[in-house]
Amino acid sequence: MKLYSVPHSPYASRIRIQILAGKLPIEVAAPEGGLGSESFKAMTPTGKVPALEVDGSTLVESAAIMEFLEERFPEQALMPTDPLQRAWLRSVGRFTDLDLAQALFPLFLELKLKSGDSEAIAKNLDALKARLATLEKFLSQPLAPALSEFGFLDCLLAPTLFYVVKVPAIFGEADILSATPLLKQWWHAAAERKQVAPVLDEMSAGLAAMMGS
Ligand SMILES: N[C@@H](CCC(=O)N[C@@H](CS)C(=O)NCC(=O)O)C(=O)O
């Protein structure tokens, strides 16, 4: 099996945490010809990373790849067996991708376009904080895993939280998690874990390289 990944991608980083945690026998490689190349686009339905080459097929979409690896390597599975807790994790995953990550996109765009529109930036930061308040409610539910434990939630959430913390800081919001204490506690614990920290380091290096610093 071969995972196509780029270091800064939060979606590919989910799978890299899973591989590191379970010592899964999966080679990690850059997309052939680079991300965006015609040869990589021809290999996958979406042309995006992560893409997992397995048994002559190419799987895409991080959430689907994560669940595939759970089933393919059951002895290394990170999800609990309880269907309710599994459903809770999937609901956090969907919220992360469909709401939280979407709230980051206008800020990424601002980093690229540098409009300097402070009103728009403040509005986008407020929208992001509203999503974080929702995430705090998820974490306060009884179905949430213990904040101190490594698990599937780390793979799902830590790579996106990396950007949630990093991007607002560039706009002067030094502690975006200050109003969400459970999330803040979870983030600080997760970022230190041995299965997560090396991947966050790769993300930092990848981001710096991408931004030319
Ligand atoms: N929903 C996808 C998102 C994947 C995605 O957007 N990957 C980005 C990198 S972070 C990508 O490959 N972009 C290349 C492109 O859009 O051409 C997933 O969860 O895997």
Image: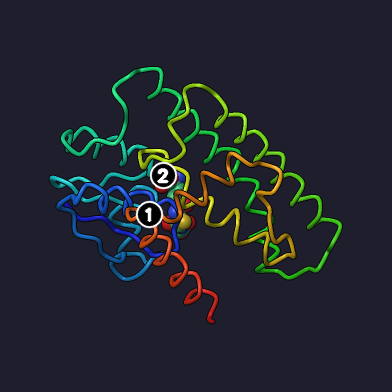
Secondary element at tag 1: loop
**Would you identify the image quadrant in which residue 146 lies?**
top left
Q: Position of residue 175 (x, y in %)?
A: 68, 56
| The C terminus - image quarter | bottom right
Q: Earlier in the sequence, mark 2 or mark 1?
A: 2
Q: Is mark 1 within 8 Å of ligand 1?
A: no
Is any part of residue 189 visible from this angle? Answer: yes
Q: Amino acid at mark 2?
A: Asp
Q: Amino acid at mark 1?
A: Val
Residue under pointer 2? 154
Is any part of residue 47 visible from this angle? Answer: no
Q: Residue at x 20, y 55 (%)?
A: 2
Q: Is mark 2 within 8 Å of ligand 1?
A: no
Q: Position of residue 201 (x, y in %)?
A: 41, 66
Q: State if disc 1 and disc 2 touch (CB < 8 Å).
A: yes
Q: Is residue 170 above or below residue 13?
A: below
Residue extending farthest to the bottom is: 213
